[in-house]
Amino acid sequence: MARDYPLLFSDSNLGNLMLMRDSDGVVAHCGLCVRPASLHGATVAVAALGAVFTRPALRGRGLGAGVVGAALGRARASGAALALVSGDGPLYRRLGFGLAPPATAWACPAPRSADSAEDAAAAEAAAAAATTDAAGECNLRLATEDDIPLLARIYDAEPVRFVRDAADWRALLRASVVFAWPGQVWIVTCAGAPAGYLAVTRSARRRVLELAGDRDALLAAAPRVADEVVVPAHDTETARDLQALTWENRAFTLPAGHQWLHSPPHPLPIPWYGLNYV
């Protein structure tokens, strides 16, 4: 888990890992990672909870509620305005979490036909070498750490986003995890200029779970490396463009809850996890 979730399990974040022990070792745990987010110009602290568990033989005794409650208390003390957690179990409901606004999954018009991981990798390699955008030459290539300044510049123009420094970008790229699945970050270039990027899961369904940049270029490129594009409720620009393209859509239940720790003067959009799942 330290490899997959480097922001949560970094040395600098050890003080935010809430655990309960007995004579045999750790019996319950809840990790907390607090990061600033920019929400339409308002900067707020967002608390992401993860790696919540109780030893199976000891479940039902309130240990999970104890460590999650401790994490929420620490989040409040740090000034967090919003708490997010992956999951929608009874424990979270009892502690005041509710479902995040629904997302929408839009099916790409040319889903991959590969059935194996090897075929999918070959299809992605071919897609990266192709130039198919009718409006001009368009390419995809995998992002590397050398691209961090470019990725940051593109991402920082998004109205709803986490605030990531270079160290965060480096850790997230090295983890190669998008939300909670193995993933890749593809840079889209059109006519030789960078247009944006796509963060895509490599699970049974290849999903774009984070994008930034020019929507026309990104949606033209997405079918070459993904089966669907998942759009959170706050991203009305992408939803509008997809409606114009008449892609098929379905409701997508985002496995994340939220709780207001301090009542805002008006509703704030919930930042999309994307690469920033704890």
Image (tube, helix red, strand yellow):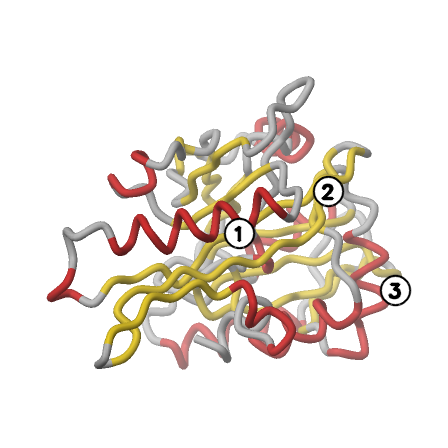
Decide: few, some or many residues near mark 2? Use Cα within 10 Å; few <14, some 14-19, many ≥20. Answer: some
- Give the structural element (helix, strand or loop) at label 2: helix
- Residue at 35 percent of width and 47 percent of height: 87
Give the camera-side residue of 117 and 76: 76
Please say if 4 is above or below 195: below
- Give the structural element (helix, strand or loop) at label 3: loop
Give the camera-side residue of 65 and 199: 65
- Give the structural element (helix, strand or loop) at label 1: strand
- Residue at 75 percent of width and 41 percent of height: 38
Name the residue tied to disc 2. Answer: 216
x and y percentages locating residue 6 in the rendered image: 57, 73
The amino acid beneath tag 2 is Asp
Please say if 217 is above or below 40: below
Q: Which mark is residue 224?
A: none
- The residue lying furthest to the front in this view is 23
The first of marks 2 and 1 along the sequence is: 1
x and y percentages locating residue 17 in the rendered image: 48, 66
Decide: few, some or many residues near mark 1? Use Cα within 10 Å; few <14, some 14-19, many ≥20. Answer: many
Name the residue tied to disc 1. Answer: 48
Decide: few, some or many residues near mark 3? Use Cα within 10 Å; few <14, some 14-19, many ≥20. Answer: few
Name the residue tied to disc 3. Answer: 192
